[in-house]
Amino acid sequence: MPGKSNAAPHPFRVKPLAAAVAASLYMTTATAQESKEAKDNTVQQVEVRGALSAYDPRRDDTAAKIVVNHDEIVKYGDTSVLDVLKRVPGVTLSGNGGRGSEVRMRGLGNGYTQILLNGERAPAGFTLDSLAPDLIERIEVLRAASAEFSTQGIAGTINIVLKKTVKAGQRELKLGFARAGDSLGPTANLQLSDKAGKLAWSVAANYTHNHLGRTVRNDQEFDDVPGTSYGLRFGRQFETGRVSIYNLTPRLIWTLDNGDTLTSQTFVNATRFQNDNHTLIDTALGEPPAYPDLRQTMSNDVKILREELNWVHKFESGAKLDAKLSGSVGAAANATYRLDGGALHELIQSNANFRGINSMGKYTSASREGHALAFGWDGGYQTNDDARRERDSGAPDVPLPGGDEFYTGEVTRLALYGQDEWNVTPRWSVYLGARWEGIQTRIEGNTFATVHNRSTVLSPLFQTLYKLPETKGDQLRLALTRTYKAADLQSLIPHRFTSVNNDQTQPDTTGNPELKPELALGIDAAYEHYWAEGALLSAAVSARNIDDNIRAQTVFDGRRWVARPVNTGRARARSIELEAKFPLKALIATTTALDLRASLSRNWSSVDNVPGPHNRLMGQTPLSATLGADYKRGPFSLGGSFAFKNGGEVQVSANQLAYESVRRDLDLYALWKFNPKRQLRIAASNVLGQDYISESSYSVAGQGTQRSRTIYPGSPMLRATLEMKF
């Protein structure tokens, strides 16, 4: 049940009094309840099937999810969590998967997939490409919404949980170096942890540096109404860049005398990026662009500090209160200098500061047997200040709108929820939940009228798991959800970012303060078959009806071309996902330690107010697939993963068409364990050296069509990492 305009929330997870201890390994079936450690924050009743089939959240939780553990996360020696996610079934990345890529579930881009960090929305300025996999304990992929997390995930939710496990006496150091045809750089990772009485502590530190150099091609063609070409341009952008990323995550855990736990987790992230490029445009036919010989220097510095305090108290009745208070501060400094001979000398500087505080809590009742009843809250306040200064001494016949712009944004959020996971029978469990979320945004600036945007959303949720009788591992899932996606702060601000060579395919961009949230009704169903330890076959279908779909539309304002997000009406999305994973010994009698996995996702969508034939949701991946294998023998392990992502055309509006190329990623790794304290990991990514190609076209009635084609080169990368314990 919707409310008004925009919204935003936060997450909190419900984990169920999980798994269990049994009296002996001879038992084949028993039912038990136990508290999982604070990291799970969930209560659940599960069936214990014996020693070989311990609690598995993928199989036993009523809420459908995929959990990627730490060993899987670090297997390929990746330097960015984005590279990890592209191998997860049903997850794809936009573009070539590099810096600034967007994570997608069900093939849906444009922010439909919610990304959480420790169950909360990530701090402002944070990007996934700056997070090292070594800092992550697990990744949870939730296909359907639950009340304890924000329901702002129409396609689904990916929750990244930072390292929480404390190992006494842990001392680990990893040193690596990566080299590709267009980049190179070192990496270093340090993990320390120990226990002293009732105090446990850990610290993880990571450093990554990369230097890149490449040539990007961009060609433009202009046709008149009969289809005759009257303009042709060939552009080459010679680019060099440097990026340095620092991560630090200290963690302290106190166990108090009464059994309560108090946890402090700090997250420090700093990224320094600098890019220099020189764009030369040769005009073979027609008029040249305003700036055919453009040099640009760009720098971006982001610093983020986030602190969490988590208190867990258990009552004598068996109930539990889990409360968390977190605060974050950060700053981002950006500078761009543009130079084109004597025609253009432009400097754009932007300095942003953000601060936020958030409170989350969940009370879990133990008063009713067979039920995991919980109530919780999630509220926060965030401010963003941005100062943007633009200085231009360009030619008077090619004016660039600009000047000094200042704005302050305030976002206030509140969410309340209740939920119950009920084990109706040993084979049938039901999840019922409801979450109310409200958000209020106020933006004040010197170049626009004060913006007020307010919305509320009520989300009823239902999920169920039924284990088929007279089977050992067949089960059915069903979920009915109400989810939404609110416009982010930047999409609401009506200030303009200018494009140098402004045209239909390179427009200026601006926000829209009148945006309403997208509201979706969803249904998910799945069949899962488990026939041996670690062996799974599954088939899942889903559908989403989305109201007030947001997409960018490009128009001419009388002086320049401008792209602006607007609500365009109803959209529909459908998907089918197939997955298989199993050890070879589950098929044949063998001692070969070979694990196989495969997945296939087919996605469809349509938008009512956009003409066909390619009027699907922006950035949706029509087809994706993964294939993988892992082999182990003694101290030697190796494996590979192939990820395929289809592209194709998208009708953005009646006038605008976009195209994204097919993507094929082959990654390989090998691991040698010299002894318990030394091992060497060799990994290769983008082995096929895939380029990334994007195209766009814009047609103006009575004038003709402009087409643009950009090619970003790609090359294989080889990484070597020495991993040591001391």
Image (cartoon, rainbow, N blue to C red):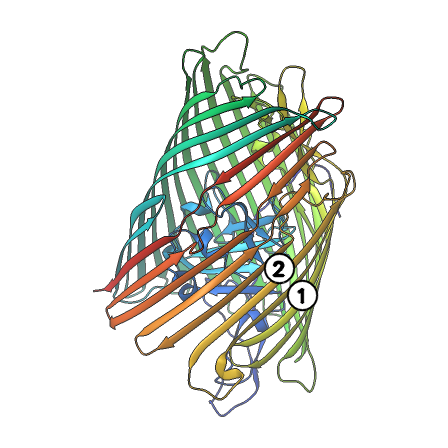
Q: Is residue 273 visible?
A: no
The x and y percentages for residue 166 are 34, 64
Few, some or many residues within 10 Å of mark 2 (<14, 14–19, 20+): many
> The C terminus appears in which quarter of the rendering?
bottom left
Residue identified by numbered label 2: 143
Q: Which amino acid, by three-letter code, is at mark 2?
A: Arg
The x and y percentages for residue 400 are 53, 15
Helix, strand or loop status at disc 2: loop
Helix, strand or loop status at disc 1: strand
Of callouts 1 and 2, the N-terminal one: 2
State the residue in front, 532 or 36: 532
Query: Would residue 273 be found to the left or right of residue 539 on screen?
Result: left
Kindly indicate whether the residue at mark 2 contacts the one at mark 1 (C-beta within 8 angstroms): yes
On residue 180, which mark appears? none
Which is in the foreground here, disc 1 or disc 2?
Answer: 1
- What residue appears at the point 68 percent right and 37 percent down from the top-left corner? 652
Residue identified by numbered label 1: 540
State the residue in front, 399 or 470: 399
Query: Would residue 629 be found to the left or right of residue 518 on screen?
Result: left
In the picture shown, does residue 548 fall above or below 667? above
In the picture shown, does residue 380 fall above or below 392? below
The x and y percentages for residue 224 are 70, 24
- Mark 1–mark 2 Cα distance, whole angstroms, equals 10 Å
